[in-house]
Amino acid sequence: MKVSSILVALATYNEKENLPSLVAAIHAELPQADLLVVDDNSPDGTGLWCDEFARQAPWFSCHHRSGKLGLGSALRAAMQAANEQNYQSLITLDADWSHPPSVLPQLVEASKNADIVIGSRYCSGGRIEGWPWRRKLASRSINFSTRFLLGIPVQDCSGNFRLYRTKLLKQVPWHTLQDEGYAFIEEILYHLHSLGGCFAEVPIVFTDRRAGESKISSREIFGAARTLVRLTAKRVKRLGSRV
């Protein structure tokens, strides 16, 4: 029987090196929360570790998928699980230790006055450690373009460290969301803003992953660009209909 109002979700593919210590840190910061792992049939045994751990931790569960289906579809699955199981809040973060679990209580506190709270690298007090300048420049460019073209009033549009109030998630027109990859992060933000969601940002120190390899590819980058163009056209059409 579910007793928690908060679900924390991690999308994983080959994160066995990071997951045990990260799960322990999350539970230490938010012992009242349940934790869901959405695993894409990781060859390194991440899913097997989850099954073993779930036997001793009633607050922990794993949703196994048939293969590497993309971050966006994993986040969608977590959001739908949070909606269907009537959690009040869903928190998402990366499974590679790049997002600090110590900030989780601050996200929960900030959600008292916001529908979406973002653990932000780019608001005042936030920063990135361990990235080369080219990657920082690419991230800054994506965020500037998203803010400018889509009118989303936050500094960090592309980070996955977020708290969502499910009351707003339940209003999302899920059939219109198309991206299954990393660009889903911007796409869901666009829809939540269109629904009138109230945003807040909490500064974080983002660090490069502790172990394993990055999953971002050039294909994901081009996919994000296509999604941004599509959403911009959708916004222009929506604004034009109001004139």
Image (cartoon, helix red, strand yellow):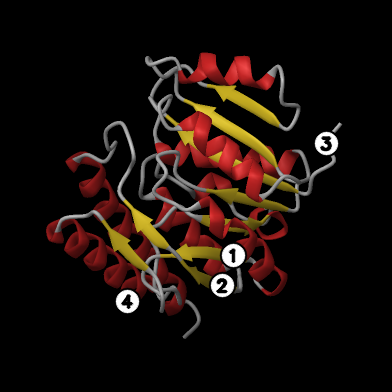
Q: Residues within 10 Å of mark 1 (few under 14, many from 20)?
A: many
Relative image position of residue 189 (x, y in whole percent): 48, 61
| Distance between the alpha carbons at the discs numbered 1 and 4 | 19 Å
Looking at the image, can residue 52 be seen? yes
Residue at left offset 51%, top offset 38%? 22
| Distance between the alpha carbons at the discs numbered 4 and 3 | 41 Å
Q: Nearer the viewer, mark 2 or mark 3?
A: 3
Q: Nearer the viewer, mark 1 or mark 4?
A: 1
Residue under label 2:
199
Relative image position of residue 97 (x, y in whole percent): 42, 44
Residue under label 1:
116
Relative image position of residue 142 (x, y in whole percent): 26, 63
Of residues 69 and 31, the one nearer the viewer is: 31
- Check contact, mark 4 vs mark 3: CB within 8 A: no
Residue under label 3:
2
Q: Residues within 10 Å of mark 4 (few under 14, many from 20)?
A: few
Residue under label 4:
148
Relative image position of residue 141 (x, y in whole percent): 22, 67
Q: Nearer the viewer, mark 1 or mark 3?
A: 3
